Image (cartoon, helix red, strand yellow):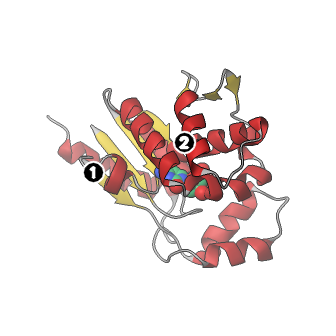
Amino acid sequence: MIVAIDGPAGAGKSTVARRLAERLGFRYLDTGAMYRALTWLARQRGVPLGNGDQLGELAAEHLVSFDEQGRVWIADTDVTSSIRKADIDSLVPVVARHPAVRKVMRGRQQELADDGNVVIEGRDIGTVVAPQAAVKVYLNADRSVRANRRLAERPEIGADALATDLRLRDESDTTDLDVEDVVAQIEELVRARQPA
Ligand code: DC
């Protein structure tokens, strides 16, 4: 069974998806980490981030993997920590918008999801990557809450810059619910769809 968790930056997707997977005993697939890993590799290899075709080829040659511990690998390198730096934060949207890149990522994500029970987190999972998902959740929170959450993750970045960035994105609704409430609600949806 596939559970898709989509939503904008800072809505709490990672925390909720990880926790949900843990509670259900499902695997957890972080698709944002895959775009981040490719961005890291492109910089490493000097591939121009404006060149979609070249980035698509790079992605196809070096598929992203996750090991048993959930660590992220590309081109035989463990990039788990490197992909959480501010420089990757700012460059990854440039890489992720190329259709050639998205096509390779979609294929790889479908391959990684094709085996048993999995919670997949991203922006396009329920619509593009796994439209057949048994449960689809769009997680959201209001702008100031999302900005604060991003700031807590990246204390080195100023709050003003973050608020500006997040204002470009959407509105409403995990603001008043805590993680355990959200996870419990989704867990109920999943259990209702699981065979008895
Ligand atoms: O969720 P995140 O911050 O780790 O995502 C990193 C980047 O990748 C962000 O720019 C959104 C993009 N992304 C995407 O386009 N599609 C996905 N399924 C997941 C992430």
- In terms of secondary structure, where does tag 1 sit? loop
Contact, mark 2 vs mark 1 (Cβ under 8 Å): no
Looking at the image, how many numbered discs can be counted on the residues? 2
- In terms of secondary structure, where does tag 2 sit? helix
Q: Circle 2 sits on which residue?
A: 56
Relative to 192, say whether 82 is above or below.
above
Q: Is residue 166 left or right of residue 68?
A: right
Amino acid bearing label 2: Gly
Quarter-of-image position of residue 164: bottom right
Q: Position of residue 5 (x, y in %)?
A: 41, 52
Q: Quadrant of the C terminus?
A: top left
Q: Quadrant of the N terminus?
A: top left
Taking the spot 44% from the left edge, 34% from the top edge, the residue there is 108
Q: Nearer the viewer, residue 95 or 13?
A: 95
Q: Position of residue 174 (x, y in %)?
A: 47, 67
Whether residue 45 is visible: yes
Give the distance between the C-alpha atoms of the residues marked 2 and 1, in whole angstroms: 23 Å
Relative to 127, say whether 2 is above or below.
above
Amino acid bearing label 1: Pro
Quarter-of-image position of residue 149: bottom right
Q: Nearer the viewer, residue 54 or 119?
A: 54
Mark 2 or mark 1, earlier in chain: 2
Taking the spot 47% from the left edge, 41% from the top edge, the residue there is 105
Taking the spot 70% from the left edge, 24% from the top edge, the residue there is 77
Q: Which mark is residue 131?
A: 1
